[in-house]
Image: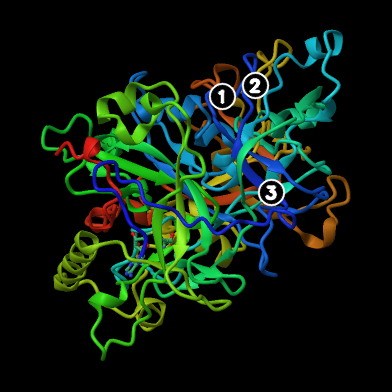
Amino acid sequence: EPQCNAADGTCASSLIEEDLSDCHVILGLRNVRNNDHNSARKLGVFANRPLPRGMPLPPTTSSEITGDVVIHLVDVLVSNTSQLDKWLSHGYLVDAVSSGYGGNYEGNGRVLTALPGIGMLASSFVDEGAANDETNNDDSSLVAKRGPNTWASIPTTDEANHPRRYSPLAGSFALNYNLTFRAIQPISIGEEITVDRSGWFRRNSLKGAANSKIKHMDQYDSVVCLDSNIYRSYSKNGRGAFASKSIQKGSVVAYSPVLPLPKNELQYLRKKDLKKIDAVPRDQLLLNYCFGHDKSSVLLFPYGSFVNYINHASSELLVSKEDKHPTANVRVMWSERFKGEKVEEDPHSMAPADLWNSPSPEPLVFEYIALRDIQPNEEILLDYGTSWSDAWDNHVSRWKQDPLNKEGGLDAMADSNSNDYSPAYIMEDVVSNLRTAEEQLSFPYQKNVFTACFYRYERTESNSDAIPSTTILYEATPWKMSRGLFDMTNLRPCKVISRAPATDRHTGEQLHGGKIFYTAIIQNRPGLAEHERIPNDTKHVVSGIPREAFRFVDRPYSSDEHLEGAFRHHIGLDETGMYPEAWLDL
Ligand SMILES: C[S@@+](CC[C@H](N)C(=O)[O-])C[C@H]1O[C@@H](n2cnc3c(N)ncnc32)[C@H](O)[C@@H]1O
């Protein structure tokens, strides 16, 4: 059993020497330079071996290629004193609208997204200064590269077999997952792995991104291997983390840096409730992924790869012999490997107020240590603590008291006629022919969804007068396919007004084998720049839109995480002795 020091929460971490020779990707302290755009970031990820194009990051020892969870924060109030704002400016959060990973319509206010794993661990590629580097290049380790060296596709969405009204888990975990970053160009040994957080690269790659420079790290300190021993799969508790190989008792299953955050920043008022006097603040879904302590205002969000998939099970001591449930097989401990030299910068000894004011404290890193030998494909389970499990038991009994709720998950749902809610990802699967606005009067879609189209529109000097006005509706603009069009930033609400097979204008003969095309009125989405907005007094009618260019979208505040009474509780570290006394401010 590791020994923890009650005063500062430090524990002697597992010091089994690690062999890095087989390691592909390394987490290390960055060698920060003054002109470094990511200078607030002390940690970075680096290639320890040549990484071929297409390689998923981090590489996993399993044959399963799985990506990380995506967590949206809804209606975040922007204030320059908040930690969330600091996270955003340091690139730990992205703006849902511009980054292109979805979530744009989760709320009516500002939606920010956490992309734990490579999405948060890697520094961002920044294009600024690329031109200057050409002339004053005195550093031979600079290599010309095009854009960031990784890219992730849009994540998958589903309810993991926990539909609302049929499972008390509905709304308590993130619906978006499997965000997989891959190398988009060969990455050489020592090169820093970078991501694009702004969506800039996605958009500009269409126009031909500028040639830019990516730095080779000449040295990095305090390294650990980031290759993943775990992969994501389904568990009875939503998605879970599973061992991709056998793991020896006492060894590190995963490393994860954690970001501190005051509890009250995860409380929010929905933008649509702001004017109500009796509006009650809600907890962001992110709370369920954070570690905390009942006597502290400090939360810790872990952003290592796949650790956010780790579910709860009691530790052996709490379980009776008859109880056959699997027990916890990992515990968390502070990693001693990233300790800085200056004690005054050690966040463990800072009072919360100093933590929040410190521009970039020493990194805080967790080690997930195996409590016993773990077999391949065994679920990785952590004891979330008694305050979490009491809260969960209370939640389940309250949930069962509601006569409209019926346990049994998807199977029970299949037997029922309930049809008042259908999430957008299901509508996308089952509705092949879209209904026109007129058809919807007698045969409406479920209230929680609307249709949107991929469409790019920018007002330029030449077309600013040429937008069809309300009075000339019949003059529709033909839909045009272009590279990068299917980016989430181009998804705008749109109303279908007609549907017909393509025909030759002169002969009336069917074209494209009778494929159906739609005419729709395109609208503005929130967060568009002024020159991208279709002016209020004009209608923008577009014809010839194929079904592939439409998406069903969940209306703001309608997805599971917004359910009244959805479970919210942090993961408790109360019994571990890891919270330093300086943080116990409640
Ligand atoms: C850190 S996340 C774990 C990953 C989560 N299962 C997912 O699919 O994203 C914590 C959430 O997982 C679920 N969870 C984990 N362990 C559980 C358990 N033993 N019983 C019920 N729900 C659990 C709850 O939804 C909880 O809020």
Residues 107 and 181: in front is 181
Residue 530 spot, x, y in % from top left: 55, 17
Label 1–label 2 contact, CB within 8 A: yes
- The residue furthest left is 278
Residues 544 and 56: in front is 56
Residues 317 and 278: in front is 317
Q: Which residue is mark 3?
A: 25
**In the image, which disc is placed on residue 180?**
none
- Front: mark 2 or 3: 3
Quadrant in which ligand 1 is drawn: bottom left
Which amino acid type corresponds to the residue marked 3 in the rendered image? Val
Classify residue 354 by image quadrant: top left
Q: What's the residue at 28%, 68% (across, down)?
A: 168
Q: Which residue is mark 1?
A: 534
Say which element carries label 3: strand
Instruction: Rate crowding at label 1 as few (under 14), some (14 to 19) or many (20 or more) other CA atoms within 10 Å.
Output: many
Residue 327 spot, x, y in % from top left: 36, 76
Q: CA distance from mark 1 to mark 3?
A: 46 Å
Q: Which residue is mark 2?
A: 467
Q: Total marks drawn?
A: 3
N-terminal-most mark, 2 or 3: 3
Which amino acid type corresponds to the residue marked 1 in the rendered image? Ile
N-terminal-most mark, 1 or 3: 3
Q: CA distance from mark 2 to mark 3?
A: 51 Å
